[in-house]
């Protein structure tokens, strides 16, 4: 009689041989990437944002090293014998009515305009983030008071107030930064408040609270880092808005006062020479246009890069 075990053994061995393999690691280019690496990869795929970042770096370096870039010219150097000269190899952007090198004035004006834009955006981000974080986390009467103050600032016709305040304070660089900062923080406050209202109910916050973490630690170490994406994007876009607002004020004669050049007061100075010397309008106007477009494209790229729901298609 044949041994049943001898016939069963090959069958068992055969079954073991064809056991389906266990699922391996998740396929795809994102499986081993950190959050920062994912954001950087998303940002690199936004070609306009990358190009805009390069343009902004070039403009910023030109503004920082203005003394080198302008080949020794000064923005206040007057030479009436070279008044309203057309662009040439000696004066790349021509000269103004007082014979001052327009390229030099545009470069130094960019230094002031960029400084105002970055400083105002950073100040507004600090004020708005603090206000929104406190209002969103604590809620109740604190939230009501802070949001009503925010609504009050939003209801003020800020351009009229900016003009009056600038005229009253004198229109120095510090005055313009302070005035603009007071009217740029409200959108940031509303954004941060909404994020805090949502995040403070999440499980990780409840876990931190149950473990004995203080309110300060929960706000700054648990919730705030999760709101940095929208804050960074909003701050980037505020740079462009601050540059445009300062340019408008300077064009109206209420911004930074001459002889300090900004792109806005360069346009104001060139207003009466639009047909006689149009290059005095072209170059400051193009500087504003290129910078604001670059900042906006950079903000779009950062928004896409910092969006956790954004998908990456394809491989590097």
Image: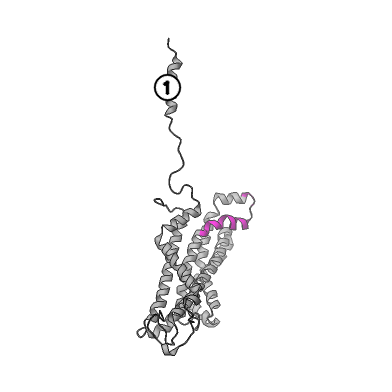
Image coords of residue 22 (percent x, y): 46, 35
Looking at the image, which residue is at 44% across and 16% down?
6
170 vs 300: above or below: below
Depth order, front residue of 77/133: 77
245 vs 83: above or below: above
| Magenta run includes residue 211 | yes
Q: Label 1, secondary structure: give it.
A: helix
What are the residue bounds of the magenta stretch? 210-228
Principal secondary structure, stretch drawn in magenta? helix
**Residue at the outermost bottom position:** 81
Looking at the image, which residue is at 55% across and 74% down?
178
Residue assigned mark 1: 11
Image coords of residue 294 (percent x, y): 42, 67
Looking at the image, which residue is at 62% across and 49% down?
210
**Residue 170 appears anywhere in the view:** yes
Looking at the image, which residue is at 44% across and 23% down?
12
């Amino acid at each position: 009689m044949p041994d049943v075990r001898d016939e069963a053994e090959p069958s068992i061995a055969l079954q073991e041989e064809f056991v389906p393999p266990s699922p391996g690691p998740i396929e795809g280019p994102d499986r081993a990437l950190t959050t920062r690496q994912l954001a950087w990869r998303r940002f690199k795929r936004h070609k306009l944002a990358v190009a805009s970042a390069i343009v902004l770096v070039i403009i910023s370096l030109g503004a920082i090293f203005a003394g080198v870039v302008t080949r020794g010219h000064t923005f206040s150097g007057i030479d009436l014998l070279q008044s309203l000269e057309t662009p040439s190899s000696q004066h790349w952007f021509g000269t103004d009515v007082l014979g001052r090198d327009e390229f030099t004035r545009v470069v130094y004006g960019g230094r002031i305009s960029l400084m105002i834009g970055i400083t105002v955006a950073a100040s507004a981000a600090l004020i708005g983030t603090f206000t929104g974080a406190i209002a969103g986390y604590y809620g109740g009467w604190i939230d009501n008071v802070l949001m009503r103050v925010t609504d009050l600032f939003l209801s003020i016709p800020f351009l009229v107030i900016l003009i009056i305040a600038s005229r009253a304070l004198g229109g120095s660089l510090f005055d313009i930064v302070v005035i603009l900062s007071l009217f740029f923080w409200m959108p940031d406050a509303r954004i941060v408040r909404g994020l805090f209202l949502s995040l403070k109910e999440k499980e990780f916050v409840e876990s931190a609270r149950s473990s004995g973490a203080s309110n300060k630690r929960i706000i700054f170490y648990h919730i705030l880092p999760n709101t940095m994406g929208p804050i960074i994007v909003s701050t980037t876009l505020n740079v462009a808005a601050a540059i445009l607002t300062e340019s408008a004020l300077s064009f109206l004669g209420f911004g930074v006062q001459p002889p300090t050049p900004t792109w806005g007061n360069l346009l104001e100075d060139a207003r009466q020479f639009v047909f006689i010397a149009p290059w005095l309008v072209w170059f400051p106007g193009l500087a504003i246009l290129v910078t604001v477009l670059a900042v906006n494209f950079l903000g779009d790229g950062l928004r896409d890069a910092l969006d956790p729901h954004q998908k990456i298609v394809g491989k590097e």
